[in-house]
Image (cartoon, grey):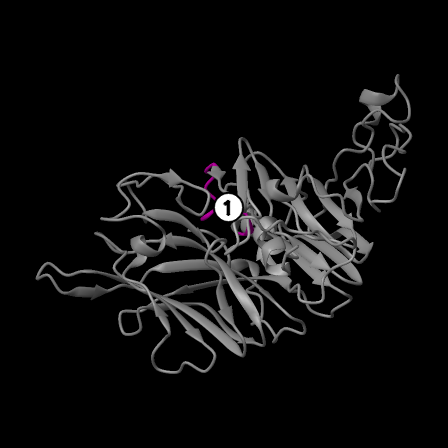
Amino acid sequence: MQKISRGAFFKALLGASSLSMAPSANARPVVQPGGWQGTGMGMLPVLFQAESRQVSPENPTGGKGMGARAIPNPNDPRLPFSRAAVDLGQGWKVSPFYKPKAGETLTIMDVDGPGVIHHVWIATEENWAGNGRACVLRFYWDHEDTPSIEVPLTDFFAVGNDKFAEVNSLAVVVNPTAALNCYWPMPFRRHAKITFTNELSRDVNLLTYQIDYMLTEVPADAGYLHAQWRRATTSRSLPEHTILDGVKGEGRYVGTFLAWAQLSDGWFGEGEVKFYIDGDNQFPTICGTGTEDYFGGSYGFPDVFCTPYTGNTLKREDGNGPRLWSLYRWHIMDPVCFHRDFRATIQALGWWPNGRYQPLADDVASVAYWYQREPHAPFPKFPPLEARWSR
């Protein structure tokens, strides 16, 4: 009887509906007992050793039997629903959200492993209106000193330019009115810590979250999720935006999100996406054929689309101000593997009236998503608030 490989488990983890094994049509997989083997529909029937947990304002520690223990106290500003629950008492939605103060950093997850996060849901104020990039998420794995994920809140969930748009993909789902969901699997071995920082000059009126995870063994060959945000204005002399560079070690690149603000009229998307892998210098190993091609479109982006792996979620506007785009591309079925180093760039090219490429000076922000072994190379210094504001 043929044993299922760990690679097949990870295929199931990322959404495969079948665990069929080639080349033998009669071969049947054998699932070995133990820890985390992945999730997804193909793995739902598999019973492996795991304990389900969730952290939320109603159970900040994720402890077993520790949810809904707050006692209504209308005089306690930390219990915002006390007045609503005062007649019902303990166990009736007493502490469903927080109000982060101006400049405050809240630790919203702080648990020991081993385990894996499967789902993160966050909701804040209904009207982001330039405020989403003022709230910062940071994820720390296994007591590291610097975060492996450091991103503005909205960009991490594929919401660009602080303009709400629904997203219906496998990795990220954004629902009305301000519900942010991600389903990137995030294994950790010793510890997981997530912080939320409010860099606004005022309090945030509402922050609530649910982070679903399992306590279970993590395979030795599982990498850690990383995500990094960058923003820059390209120049006509150097019309290229660096999505990610400086990555060292072994890993897989799994996703790109772009929040693009055009500062010139006309079409912006002739530039190519390039992946420099394991020592590539002047020329990349992977080079696409254009921006709309990389994001799964063709002949421009004449309409919005939102699919499991690719999307353009903002309607094209021809009014005053820059034309804004929110574009995602998840490499779930086609991860880009590297073993020593990795770099990703995108060009900013349009057209001159004479039919030649026009280098563009555009405002480009990006989130790069990848898995790798720790430790990771130092991230660039995170931009201050004034450098993150949407136009």
Residue 306 image point, x, y percent? 41, 40
Q: Secondary structure at mark 1?
A: loop
Mark 1 packing: few (<14 Cα in 10 Å), some, or many (20+)?
Answer: some
Q: Which residues are magenta?
A: 156-166
Q: Nearer the viewer, residue 126 or 298?
A: 298
Q: Is residue 263 magenta?
A: no
Picture quadrant where residue 228 is located: bottom right
Kind of residue sitting beneath label 1:
Gly
The residue singled out by tag 1 in the image is 130
Residue 229 image point, x, y percent? 52, 61
Q: Residue at x 64, y 65 (%)?
A: 223
Position of 188 with respect to 228 (left or right) is right
Residue sitting farthest toward the top: 87
Picture quadrant where residue 364 is located: bottom left
Q: Is residue 161 magenta?
A: yes
Residue 246 image point, x, y percent? 52, 76
Residue sitting farthest toward the left: 354
Vertically, is 91 above or below 40? above
Classified by dominant secondary structure, the portion drawn in magenta counts as: loop
Residue 103 visible? The answer is no
Residue 369 visible? The answer is yes
Position of 177 with respect to 296 (left or right) is right
